Amino acid sequence: MFDLSASNLTFLGITVFVFAVLGVLSAIQAVMTTRTSQGAVAWAITLIMWPFAAVPAYWIFGRSRFHGYVDLRRDRSSDVFEKLEDLRAKLAKYTVDLGSRFGEARALEQLARTRFTRNNHTRLLVNGQDTFQAIFEAIESANEYILVEFFIINDDKLGRQLKDKLIVQAKRGVTVYLLYDDVGSSGITKRYLRDLTGAGIHVTGMRTTRGWRNRFQINFRNHRKIVVVDGRIAFVGGHNVGDEYLGGNPKLSPWRDTHLAISGPAVLAIQLAFVDDWYWATETLPVVNWEPQPSEDDDRIVFVLPSGPADEHETCGLFFTHAINSAKERIWIATPYFVPDEGVITALQLAAFRGVDVRILIPGLPDKALIKLAAMSYVGQVVDTGVRVYEYGDGFMHQKVLLVDNHAAAIGTANFDNRSFRLNFEITVLTIDDQFNKEVERMLLKDFADSREITLEDLAARPWWKLAISQIARLFSPIL
């Protein structure tokens, strides 16, 4: 009995020692890598004082850079960079120097390593029916290849429609690549995947847990939604592949979302984002067409901004900050999750002080209660400075739309939160065109008409316990 007890004490002592060492080492890394001094101090103290709980939490939630992806791109993906250089050369004749039309547009080009291009057409797709009808029509028209990338793919009615259409095209000889996020698409079945691979379709998850440093993390989700057909048309926006996006979830129906169809040289920049992700997941390059195909219907200026935790800078958050700072007359934002950082909050407040018409549209009916509670703490901050915030009242609103002045509109996959700004792989498409801006304006005006504005009186009337819960929820904002 004594020997067993001594053995247990020895094991306990070793365990405590190991966690204490891991806590100190993790605290050092947190101090060296955490973005803010407040975050670094909070992690360091917690890791040293309570290592048993804090060490696993840090390695699951604490890191903001996806180093495995960075390492692969630097050390082993020279082919991807060669494609990038080739693409720049091919797009040179279509590039546009905007000067100061969208703030200092060159800053965005340096951030994304891509250029604004002309000879593009963009088509607004409102809600799921129009979106998937357009996507399926494009898939059916494919001659060479189809690239498909979604955060969520469900094995439900809509998911099986997509699968069946891809299989038909694969049997016709079209090359099909399908990439999904392993966590977002956790509901995808083995049978679903077998049906795809059995038809000769190339399928993979994003595999962000590859490598010992990534084994236990659940951050770094691939939140992009991309479809590219033959390098001539692409789709980007808020819709994933699931029946709820067509109103199939009674609790959240009708589902409000927005997507975008793009044709023209900008499609190749979207295609490059897919190729980069595919290379990370498989260490192979898809065979695709890199010749620009200018639109015959329009001459819109388009900028494509892929962003993610492998970027040298915080690309997504900097883009939104740039857009807010560049606004002279108005900036309207539609987002399902309004949990920004203090820098973005400050930019919104300053825009309102400048006299800019700042409006933010958020869901009245949330799909995630904790995020809505945290969002209300930020709403109070901005409404007090003249920002107008609206709660959408007809089902769940999931669109990610930005409207700046009378010429710029952005649609993509990025939410207005820390996860999209720093932890997720996202993609945003910015269109510089007065006519398209008016189309987006009409869409958002209808959304505002279907919403209720949150006033200072509403905020003041909240009971103390709701205020307390919102502030507590706000503490979790970095990982929501």
Image (tube, grey):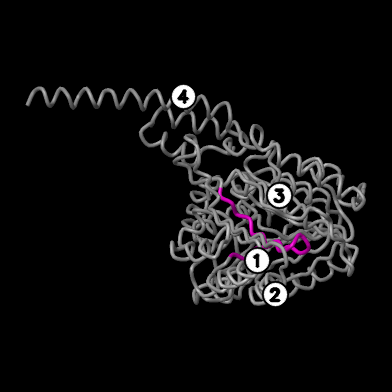
x and y percentages locating residue 397 in the rendered image: 61, 68
Distance from Cα at disc 3 to Cα at disc 1: 30 Å
Compare residues 287 and 322 and report the one nearer the observer: 287
Depicted 442 relative to depicted 302: above or below: below
Residue 223: say if magenta: yes
Task: Tell me the amino acid under the disc marked 3.
Answer: Pro
x and y percentages locating residue 151 in the rendered image: 57, 58
Residue corresponding to mark 4: 25
Q: Earlier in the sequence, mark 3 or mark 1?
A: 1
Query: Visible in this render: residue 222?
Result: yes
The secondary structure type at the circle numbered 1 is loop
Q: What's the mark number on residue 137?
A: 2
Distance from Cα at disc 2 to Cα at disc 1: 17 Å
Residue corresponding to mark 1: 173
Task: Tell me the amino acid under the disc marked 4.
Answer: Leu
Q: Nearer the viewer, mark 2 or mark 1?
A: 1
